[in-house]
């Protein structure tokens, strides 16, 4: 390829790629630079590791990091785990399958914050869960289900919101496996689980990885579910970042949390992607 | 004891379509049986019932005397070779072949022995680490065959395994399949709509039409002595003529009065003769026909001639030689011993 051709390709790609690179790159650049003491809104600008040191020393940060990593991992793995059997079930069309598929994907159209408020209505003191439990005599008085310390509410919301997305990606991938390939596996002695582990999962690994990565990144940066339904004794990374910025105008420290969140998203995604492929490879050996 | 048996098997799909009706068929151990018929005749449905992918609506399936009607495919002593090969695209040739033995907990040494033997037999030793998409169609079909044989099944089911191969390759893979079947001694049930494949490979041919068995017999038998108009027309080329009985040895047809070797079957719908049975160079005697040639097509080893007697479909003749030797008129004789009577209707 000569330099003229290379230049032409770069020129043709510039309108699309250039905008993406500038938009994402500039945000990333500002966040990183701000975490090292530049782009200050107030005060002097100078290179400093102080903001990193303060944030990394804070217990609140390490708790937020662990909590966000936990929520993101559970959301990603949980959503994919729930979506797979449904995708396999819906692989062949049957009467009503289109309606079921559409209903299952409905949460994709509900904004996260709206979903959180709907969820609160269900589990609140006056919500239908408490009323039902009182009606059947399980409890005499309403129980506090909201903002539970185990973050079950947030996990539920994450799965409710993200499972349809995983289903969307996995359905297409599962449907692309031919009936004859699955019949051949069955004919050769593979039961339902063996067919999933040795044929379906390896052949849909790219869709699985895409679902894991996208859900992980989204859940790691969750703010809406956490502030409405999440536990009050721990903050998510996004929540902590906003807290730093809002409470004392600590923009540089908020930037440190922001960069850490990006690193968490990147590392977590890589780990999930590599792990899923490695697990499938080892599964294929036996 | 029969290797595989279907007893009064019928299959009606959810949409009400009857794919099979009252199929009773016994297949002996080591036999090569072909299910032959046009698209939609039910041959693949019957094969899938033998494999366990479909359950029959009525009737039952026995393997080695045991009722396996409701047994799933993984619990049957059968292995299937699919039309599209159905190789696992993410596994290498060796891993594909080892898949069945691994699932069936065959120990590692035995597995490797089977793998190496099969790779040698299908001549794919140098391709063992390749993925299926790196192989040609013929090689993929051989992997599919080796994968089925690695299970050491007593019955191998073939679902039009050569339909995706070109004519030349089809012939060599066909010979290979037959050779392996003789070597391993497994029972083979082979589905095809290609009559030449069926005639060349089979011990017995089962001709299916509209979900029913039309005729079962050795290849020569179904070709030389078709029972029905459908079998005569579907296997090879056949000329079918309506007839009227004159006496025990003479019938009246659109080609004139013809002498036949035995008394005509009054229940038969047609008189049948094959294009290659016409004799040329005979101008006098019984069954000599003179007709105008309406169409001709050079076929290499012979020329296909069409004559158009009034009121009946075109009759075909095989002229032994190039088209240049054919004049506008053709005179030929139909030997009485090659004229048969067949039942049923056309189409």
Image: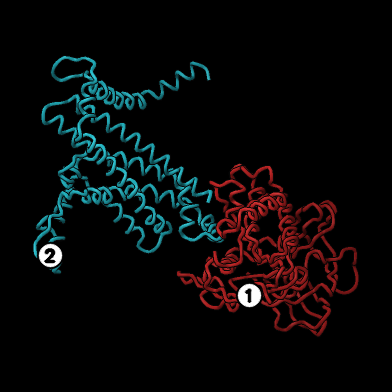
Chain colours: A cyan, B red
Query: What residue would you read off at disc 1?
Result: B5
Q: Is residue A266 left or right of residue B95?
A: left
Q: How many marks?
A: 2
The one nearer the camera, B207 or A6, is: A6
**A150 w.r.t. B328: above or below:** above
Cα distance in 3D space between marks 2 and 1: 63 Å
Q: Residue at x 72, y 68 (%)?
A: B30
State the image coordinates of residue B162 (x, y, percent, origin top left). Answer: 66, 55
Labels 2 and 1 within one chain: no
Q: Is residue A102 visible?
A: yes
Q: Which secondary structure lies at badge 2?
A: loop
Q: Which chain carries label 2?
A: A
Which circle marks residue A181 in the picture? none
Q: Which secondary structure lies at badge 1?
A: strand
Classify residue A104 by image quadrant: bottom left
Q: Residue at x 10, y 60 (%)?
A: A142
Mark 2–mark 1 CB contact (< 8 Å): no
Query: What residue would you read off at disc 2?
Result: A139
State the image coordinates of residue A184 (x, y, percent, origin top left). Answer: 55, 58
State the image coordinates of residue A125 (x, y, percent, origin top left). Answer: 10, 56
Q: Which chain carries label 1?
A: B
User: Which mark is nearer the camera, 2 or 1?
Assistant: 2
**B19 w.r.t. B88: above or below:** below
Residue density around tag 1, few if under 14, some if 14–19, many if 20 or more, within 10 Å: many
State the image coordinates of residue B210 (x, y, percent, origin top left). Answer: 59, 71
Classify residue A210 by image quadrant: top left
Q: Is residue B41 visible?
A: no
Q: Which residue is drawn at 39% across and 49% down?
A: A170
Q: Is residue B101 left or right of residue A213?
A: right
The one nearer the camera, B11 or A226, is: A226
């Amino acid at each position: 390829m000569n330099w003229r051709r290379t230049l032409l390709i770069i020129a043709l790609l510039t309108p699309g790629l250039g905008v993406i690179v500038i938009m994402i790159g500039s945000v990333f650049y500002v966040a990183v630079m701000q975490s090292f003491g530049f782009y200050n809104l107030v005060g002097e600008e100078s290179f400093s590791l102080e903001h990193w040191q303060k944030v990394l020393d804070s217990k609140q940060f390490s708790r937020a990091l662990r909590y966000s990593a936990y929520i993101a991992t559970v959301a990603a793995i949980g959503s994919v785990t729930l979506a797979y059997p449904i995708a396999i079930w819906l692989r062949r069309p049957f009467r009503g399958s289109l309606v079921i598929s559409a209903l299952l994907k409905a949460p994709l159209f509900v904004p996260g914050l709206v979903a959180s408020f709907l969820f609160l209505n269900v589990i609140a003191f006056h919500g239908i869960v408490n009323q039902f439990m009182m009606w059947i005599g399980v409890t005499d008085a309403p129980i506090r289900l909201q903002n539970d310390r185990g973050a079950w509410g947030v996990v539920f919301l994450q799965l409710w919101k993200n499972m349809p997305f995983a289903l969307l990606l996995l359905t297409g991938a599962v449907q692309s496996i031919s009936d004859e390939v699955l019949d051949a596996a069955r004919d050769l002695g593979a039961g339902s689980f063996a067919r999933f582990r040795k044929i379906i999962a390896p052949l849909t690994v790219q869709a699985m990885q895409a679902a894991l990565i996208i859900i992980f990144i989204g859940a790691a940066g969750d703010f809406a579910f956490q502030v409405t339904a999440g536990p009050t004794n721990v903050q998510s990374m996004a929540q902590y970042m906003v807290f730093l910025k809002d409470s004392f105008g600590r923009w540089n420290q908020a930037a440190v949390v922001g960069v850490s969140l990006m690193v968490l998203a990147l590392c977590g995604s890589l780990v999930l992607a590599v792990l899923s492929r490695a697990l499938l490879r080892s599964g294929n050996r036996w | 004891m029969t290797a595989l048996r279907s007893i009064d098997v019928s299959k009606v799909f959810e949409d009400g379509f009857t794919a099979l009706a009252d199929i009773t068929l016994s297949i002996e151990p080591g036999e090569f049986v072909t299910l032959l018929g046009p698209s939609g005749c039910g041959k693949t449905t019957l094969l899938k019932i033998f494999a366990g992918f479909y359950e029959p609506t009525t009737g039952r399936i026995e393997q080695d005397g045991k009722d396996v009607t409701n047994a799933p495919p993984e619990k049957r002593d059968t292995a299937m070779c699919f039309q599209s090969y159905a190789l696992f695209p993410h596994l290498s040739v060796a891993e594909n072949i080892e898949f069945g033995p691994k699932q069936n907990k065959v120990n590692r040494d035995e597995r490797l022995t089977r793998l190496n033997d099969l790779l040698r037999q299908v001549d794919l030793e140098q391709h063992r680490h390749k993925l299926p998409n790196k192989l040609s169609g013929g090689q993929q079909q051989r992997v599919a065959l080796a994968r089925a044989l690695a299970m050491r099944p007593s019955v191998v089911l073939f679902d039009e395994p050569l339909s995706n191969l070109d004519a030349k390759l089809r012939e060599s893979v066909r010979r290979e399949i037959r050779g392996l079947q003789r070597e391993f001694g497994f029972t083979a049930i082979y589905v095809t709509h290609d009559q030449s494949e069926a005639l060349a490979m089979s011990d017995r041919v089962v001709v299916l039409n509209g979900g029913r068995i039309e005729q079962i017999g050795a290849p020569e038998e179904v070709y030389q002595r078709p029972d029905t108009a459908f079998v005569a027309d579907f296997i090879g080329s056949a000329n079918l003529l309506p007839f009227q009985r004159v006496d025990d040895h003479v019938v009246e047809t659109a080609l004139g009065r013809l002498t036949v070797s035995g008394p005509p079957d009054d229940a038969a719908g047609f008189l049948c003769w094959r294009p290659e049975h016409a004799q040329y160079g005979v101008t006098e005697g019984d069954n000599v026909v003179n007709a105008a040639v309406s169409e001709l097509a050079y076929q290499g080893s012979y020329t296909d001639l069409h004559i158009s007697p009034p009121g009946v479909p075109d009759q075909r003749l095989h002229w032994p030689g190039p088209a240049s030797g054919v004049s506008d008129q053709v005179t030929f004789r139909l030997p009485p011993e090659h004229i048969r009577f067949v039942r049923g209707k056309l189409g």
